[in-house]
Structure formats: structure tokens, C-alpha cells
Amino acid sequence: MDLSVSDNNEERKELLRKFARDAPIEPGVYLWRDEENNVIYVGKAKALRHRLSSYFSGEKDPKTAALIKRAERIETIIVANEYEALLLENTLIKQYSPKYNINLKDGKTYPVIRITSEEFPRVFKTRYIVEDGSLYFGPFTNIQAVETVMAMVERLFYLRKCRVFRKRDNPCMYYHIKRCCAPCCDKISARDYRTHVKQVEKILSGDTTGLIIDLTKNMHEAAAALNFERASELRDTIRAIETLQDSASSMVVDMDENARDYIASASEGVLTTFTVFSMRGGKMIGRDLFRTRSAAEEKESVETFLMSYYNPSVPPPSVIYIETISDGNSQNSGKTGGDSLKKWFVETFGYAPSIQGADDRRHAAVLAMARQNAQEDLRKRLKERGAGPALEETMQALRLNRLPVRIEGFDIAQLDGKHPVASLISFKNGVPDRKNYRIFKLRTVIGIVDDFAAMREAVHRRYSRLAREGKDLPDLILIDGGLGQVNAVQDALDELGVDCDIVGLAKRDEELWLPGSPEPIRLSRRSEALKLLQFVRDETHRFATSFNQKLRSEDICFSVLENVAGIGAKKASAIMKAFISLERVAAASVEAIAKTCGIKPSLAHAVKTAASLSLADREAAKKRLTSGDDRSKAKVAGNAAGKAVARQTGASLAAEAAASAAAEAEPDYFPARPPKGKQSKGELH
């Protein structure tokens, strides 16, 4: 992702600040470039947006002030985690030698573990790679974890320590202290020694499940014998193995010296962004982003990009891992490279690289990281461009009289006529306008299933109110449904004397229906107009379904509590208002329920038990559905759950006190504000 700025210092700084505010929240590496496109600083971040924004807040030291003054634009590279960011930062600093980074004069890198290629191999930590057939694992950023694991390897596998192997008559000191099996004195055969080495290779490759189980068992035995020093040592060893295992599979640095490129893309309509990650000498040396506009099919777009990207100054590597163009979030990876493309490579470069999809988990992970970078750049492009082209295409495709700046969408949700609701969502300039979301609890279709009548009621209530209040109508009404639903809405508007454009979007074939039309309108699946209308349709469905599920959940909760003798509808409503969910009722102590709801302890105990039993029954039913067990097994599971609840309700006073303290620590009121990233509830009408 790039940002170019003008020569004006204040304007340039403001644009850099704006870029920082819109940077991705993911971990990654950022590069500051000057007006000559030279990299002047490389940094890493757990959250790129937060780190970059910090450059523009508060007083800055002279170095940071000079950096901002010299900077012309910023690039970001998204990676999987902080560890990957650390390794990539290290590589890029060595590659570019940025002016404002600390010089790494000693040229050191992160350590690796080497297994030599000798008859009796050595295993040791090093910072240097020697091309002699040795095996290397790493690099590792956690030096302490490396030291701990190497100490464990030394204790468990008596491998040789001497730098030069030569035959001896008597073993050295390491043999006598049980740190070497003395292959130099023929105390072990080459075959048995190799068995030990293979076990070390498995550990360093991440195959540690059996070892961790054994170490955990030994740790517990040591703790039971009050040998806490030994238990602590084993605990630290387990943690070191897990840490080493987590950091051993880097996507930006590996031991594969073969040159290779990873190419992924993301597209929306005619906009496509390609990302290229280049691995050379076992290190990721950079990431390139390329923006294109094309209406071509996937295979043609990929082949065109390959022929444009590779040239005599940028020759292709021997292997290219590639993912076909995705429509935003597709996970599919594929192969390309027909005869014509191979012929072009041979004629241009004298050879044809192997072009293939990911053949193992690691290559798939790098492609996923490349795709994430492409999607982030595409998001930026769409935001910069706005929804204008999509709205214009929608107006032309539907033959509307005006640009559909405001679109309102309707959907119906119900279950066998119970709790029927209609959702109304609003889009302005192609983006959700959530403050104008509405929910209608339908009145005329309770107990019956009639989507047409439900849609007529919702539309009639909405637009009769707008007509009475003299408010503006939307430019377009989108209905989640086909011709029947669209005609029902048109009838309702005709009764009101309201003139407004209507379109229905049917899920089955993604066809667009206009009122009274004998044939639907069919748009390309890559059409920006279709994607906009799908976004509106999916949002109406999500909003209606989520509210209907909430009503059904509340209905179940009320019925569970009302079945308790002494608890009526009013008291059940008060309990649910105080505790929000059955889970919280079951988790609260008897004293907390009694005090909060103003009921006797015996009644509170019955409420808690009813909630617990209901949750246990629900869990047992869920297990029956997922496991496919027969009825007898489900009954046993339900009885077991009931007994577990009985044991829970008869727990000790200490457990009750702890539960009470936990309940009292929770707020009495939980706001209806949705979690970050979710939509608002809207309003009831």
C-alpha cells in the first residue's frame, strides 16, 4: 500500500497522518520512503495503524521529527504475527540500510540450529549458513528458548561435542558425565547414533507431541514428590519447546535456498490488485503491489499480469506459486500456465518456470499472506474511489430515473409464523447508514406463513409514515425475494400513492426482478452493481434474522422460568432483565438471585436449578445432533448432564460464595451496543 504526497510540508504531513489512521490493524512491517523513493526507515508493529498513528501524536524527538520531514510516502506489509514482522524487519534493514535505522555493523542474524552432514553428526547453535549438506532449523528470535532446548537435547541424546571427529582409545570427559555416547571409541554404532539424530530432527521439525506428554508426566511426578526444582526445570523445558515450535515455521525466512515468487490477487468489479512476495536465498526480499483495471476472465488476467511483470530486468524464478484472482475473500488457489504462456517464457528467457498452486501448508500460508496484502490495497482503492461507479452501473442496469444514492432494503424473518419481523436497512452512497436501520414486529401474520402479506405490511407501515411526515422517499427499494414479493410491495405502494423504484434480488440465481416484468435482469457475477445490491440484500437478511433469533431466545428463556412454581410472566421478565441470559442465571449464586430479584432463597434455588437443567438439556440436544447418536445414548447423556447439574446446585458454601462474588462483580445492566464490527440494533416500529 502506497501514498504519494505533494511538496507542501503541511499538506504532505496531513496526508501521511491520514494514511496512518487508515492503515491496517494487523501486525506487519512499514517502510518510510523519501521523494526519491529511497527507503529511509523500516519498522515493525503489532498493530500497524496504532504504531503509525503514534508518529503524529505528542512531542517527537529530533530523529522522529527529521524522519517525518523527509518522508514522502509510507508502505505497509502485512504479516502473520509479531515474530514474522521481526524477521522481515531484520531482512529489510540489511537489504536497504535505511538512514534512520541503527546500523547492524556486525552483520549478525538470528540463530539457527545446525545438524552436520557427517557420519556422526553434531547438533549445535550457529548464526552462519554453510552449504555443505547440513540440515538447518530456524531462524529463532527467542535465544533463551534455543538455549533451553539445546540443553535438553544434550541431556536426552548423548551426541558428540568435538569439532573434529577422530578415533580415540579412551573416551573424553563428556562420556563419563553422560553427555556423549563416545562414537570415537566405538561405544555406539553409526546406525544407533543416527537413530538419536533422527529423534532430534523430529523435535526441531515440530513433532514434539509425544515428548511433551512424557515431560509433562515427569513434571507432575516431580511436583508430587515435592521436587519442585526439577518440576520447574521440566516446566521451562516444555515452554521452550512450544516457543521454539511456534517460531520455527517462519513465512518470511526459511532454509530453502531455491528462488521462488508467491503471487495472489483480490478483485472487485474491474479493479484488481496483484501482490508478489519474492523469496531469494531463503529470505523474503520484498513485496510488490500492482493495481490493474480489467474485465477479463481470471485465467486471462493472471497470464496478462505474468507477461507484464516478468521482463529481462526481472526474470522469473524457477518456481512461481500462484493463486487465481479472488472475488474478495475466496480461498481458492489454482494453477495457470497454458502452452502459449510456457512458449512465451521459453522464447523470452530460455526456460519456463514451474507455475503451480500451494503444494503444502507453508506455501499456502505465504499465499494467504500475499492475498491479505492484496485485499488491504483493494480496500484502500475502493475507499478512495467511492461507490460512484457502482451506483451509476446500478442506475443503467435497472433503467432508473436517478442515481440510487439512498437505497432501502427489506427482508422477513420468522419460524413457522412465530415472532415474524421485518428488517429495514438503509444505504447512503453505497455504504450502510445504520442510524436509519429499523425493525418491524409484524402484526397481521402472527401464526401464519405469508411472506407476501408480511412484506406488504412492513412496506405499508414504513412509507405511510414517511408520507404523513412529509419526509423524503428512498431512490430505490430492494426486496429480498423474487417477482411475487416485488409485486406485493408495488401493490402496497400503489395503495399509498407512493411512486418509488423497486427491485427484487432472488437468492437462487442472483436474478433481479422489476415489478410486472416477465423476465429477470441477469448481471455478470463480477458486476459492481450486482455486488452492491447483494451487499444490501445480505445486510437486510442478517439484521432480520438476528432480531428474530433474539426474540425466540427470549421466548425460550421466559418459558423456562415461568415453569418454576411461584414465578409468573412478570417475575420471569424481571429476572431476565437483571441477568440478561439463562447462562448468567445458572452461573449466579442463590444469594445473588434472591437479592437481585427480591425473591426467597428457596425460590431462587429453584430458578437457578431450572436454568441449569435447561442449559444441560440444550447441550445434550446439541450433542445428539452433532454426533448422530441413537436415542438411548442421547438419554444417557441427558441424564448425566442432569446429575452434573444436581451436583452443581448442591456445591459447597465456598463455591457458592465465589459464584456470588463473581455475579456481584458484573454490571446489572449490559448495554445493547454490539461488539466492535457488528451492526447496531436499529429501532422498533
Image: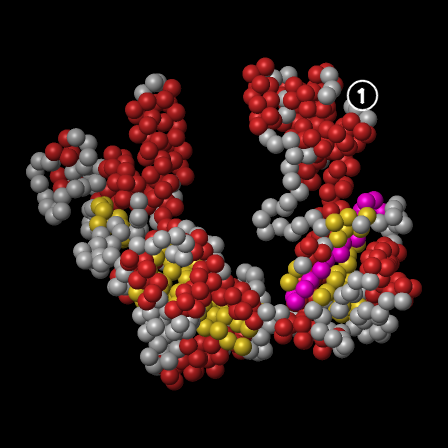
Magenta stretch: dominant secondary structure: strand
Query: In the figure, 61 relative to 568: above or below?
Result: below
* Residue furthest left in the image: 169
Query: In the figure, 531 relative to 411: above or below?
Result: below
Tag 1, which secondary structure? loop
- What are the residue bounds of the magenta stretch? 413-430
- Residue 400 shows up from this direction: yes
Q: Residue 170, percent across and down?
A: 8, 36
Q: Residue at x 75, y 37 (%)?
A: 554
Whether 417 is among the magenta residues is yes
Query: In the figure, 369 relative to 211: above or below?
Result: below
Is 399 placed left or right of 118 in the picture? right
Choose between 304 and 585: the one closer to the eye. 585
* Residue furthest right in the image: 495
Choose between 289 and 21: the one closer to the eye. 21
Whether 247 is among the magenta residues is no
Q: Residue at x 71, y 56 (%)?
A: 436
- Residue 526 shows up from this direction: no
Q: Residue 632, percent across and down?
A: 72, 30
Q: Residue 385, percent across and down?
A: 56, 71
User: What residue sits right under mark 1 in the picture?
Assistant: 566
| Picture mark count | 1
Q: For the residue carrying disc 1, how many other residues have a C-alpha within 10 Å: few (<14), some (14-19), or many (20+)?
A: few
Specify the quadrant of the image occupied by residue 192.
top left
Specify the quadrant of the image occupied by residue 429.
bottom right
Question: What kind of colouring is applied to the model shown?
Answer: secondary structure
Q: Residue at x 31, y 51 (%)?
A: 138
* Residue furthest bottom in the image: 347
Q: Residue at x 27, y 44 (%)?
A: 143
Q: Amino acid at mark 1?
A: Gly
Choose between 9 and 287: the one closer to the eye. 9
Q: Residue 317, percent across and down?
A: 36, 71
